[in-house]
Image (cartoon, grey):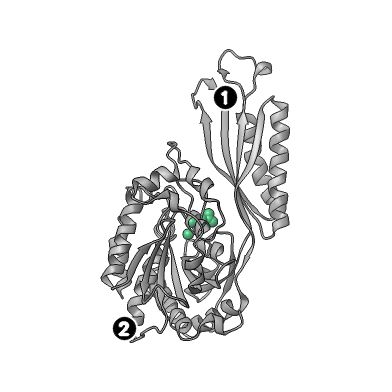
Amino acid sequence: MSFDRMWAELAPVGRAADGGYHRYTWAGADTDARAWFTGEAAARGLDVRTDRNGNLWAWWGGPGPGAVATGSHLDSVPDGGAFDGPLGVVSALAAVDELRARGVRPARPLVLAVFVEEEGGRFGVPCLGSRLTAGEISPERARGLADADGVTWAEAMAAAGHDPDLIGPDPDTLASLDVFVELHVEQGRALEDTVHPVGVASAIWPHGRWRMDFTGRADHAGTTRLADRNDPMLPFAHAVLAARAQAEEHGARATVARSVIVPNGTNAIPSLVSAWLDARADSEDTLTAVVEGVRARAEAAAREHGVGVAMTAESRTPLVSFAHGLRDRLAAVVGTRAPDPRVPVLPTGAGHDAGVLAAHVPTAMLYVRNPTGVSHSPKEWARPDDCHAGVLALADVLQDLLARPVGEVAP
Ligand code: HGY
Ligand code: MN
Ligand code: MN
């Protein structure tokens, strides 16, 4: 199966000595990974195009209406794993090879997509490429997003040779898609407890990111009396603990994993602490309750210490419930090759481009078993045999969707 050669070729791109991945949009390794994908697609005779937002689309026949689309992303979180994103991209290329080996000649276009900035690892908003294409973030806001060095999306995109003035909704591309299927490594270990190498997604939890800015007063760590301090680290610390407490109380997920401390000196009480809350829950109301609980604790602690606080939503994604008819159709197709026809149908707390597209195009997801269940870490893993099972399942699903358009059956 061509998967193994491609996987081995892509694996070193952006991998650090400790095995963690550093692929950030419009920068070195991500650019190299995009070039690798473009070469593989072109070698298969696919017509590779970059859309106005920087997403890659590799067409087998077309562009044209009624297209069956599959794909994922190549960018990573800092020190990320090898599979989150690339598994869906490499599996899509291998599925094309599998379909051709079966003699499939699609009557409608098949297109492979690689979305930019899915992780938001450089510019802070996840699924930025698919959100722009879906019209779910304003081009003005996107252009102004900046990385840790203050480089904006517009500057980075222009430096990569793309015109940031063109970014924005792409309804024509979305209208040309009959369906989008994303294959992704499972970010959890539900499948590991089953006989199934491949599962089907049922839903994506509501989730989002909130920025918290704690404004204090810089002063000397050694001479400033405690009563005279306005130390932003203290409400920041309360917010971190409140996130955990709210998650426990509501059966949700809440994490503060990123902060910027100014001036970040060992002996200087900070003037400013910025921190980001990542919160996710199984319902909109619960998510709101978690976030408002953290906000209330952060504000109370800020008042107690004479510190200013501002908390703003940077992204929020509503509950995605994948179309039941399509979900069940994929489960039936995957079940024909599975060890047991009752294929697991699973919800996830992880966001995906499929979750963004689901409001615009019939969308579904396949998961490939991850024995560690770990993701966003070099320990993320999937067995080679399970990756092969994922390619075969994806090829089966694409073949079924090419033969019988979703538009023809009730979603
Ligand atoms: O954060 C997420 O859920 C995804 O990996 N972007
Ligand atoms: Mn991810
Ligand atoms: Mn991903």
Q: In the visual, does 312 lie left or right of 80?
A: right
Label 1, secondary structure: give it: loop
**Percent x, y of residue 29:** 33, 51
Seen as rendered, the residue at the extreme left is: 43
Q: In the visual, does 39 lie left or right of 134?
A: left
Q: Give the residue type at disc 2.
A: Ala
**Percent x, y of residue 115:** 44, 60
Relative to residue 182, is residue 152 depicted above or below? above
The residue labelled by disc 1 is 271
Q: Give the residue type at disc 1.
A: Ser
**Percent x, y of residue 19:** 36, 51
The residue labelled by disc 2 is 101
Q: Residue at x 53, y 46 (%)?
A: 141
Quarter of the figure with residue 41: bottom left
Relative to residue 140, is residue 98 depicted above or below? below
Question: How many marks on residues?
Answer: 2
Relative to residue 409, is residue 50 depicted above or below? above
Q: Quadrant of the C terminus?
A: bottom right
The front one of 290 and 177 is 177
Label annotation for residue 204: none
Whether residues under marks 1 and 2 lie with C-beta atoms below 8 angstroms apart, the answer is no
Q: Residue at x 60, y 71 (%)?
A: 322
Binning the other alpha carbons within 10 Å of mark 2 as few (below 14), some (14 to 19) or many (20 upward) gives: few
Seen as rendered, the residue at the extreme top is: 223
Binning the other alpha carbons within 10 Å of mark 1 as few (below 14), some (14 to 19) or many (20 upward) gives: many
Q: In the visual, does 341 lie left or right of 39?
A: right
- On whether ligand 3 comes within 8 Å of the CB at mark 2, the answer is no
The front one of 123 and 289 is 123
**Percent x, y of residue 320:** 61, 65
Report, in whole angstroms, how far the alpha carbon at label 1 lies from the one at label 2. 63 Å
The front one of 219 and 124 is 124
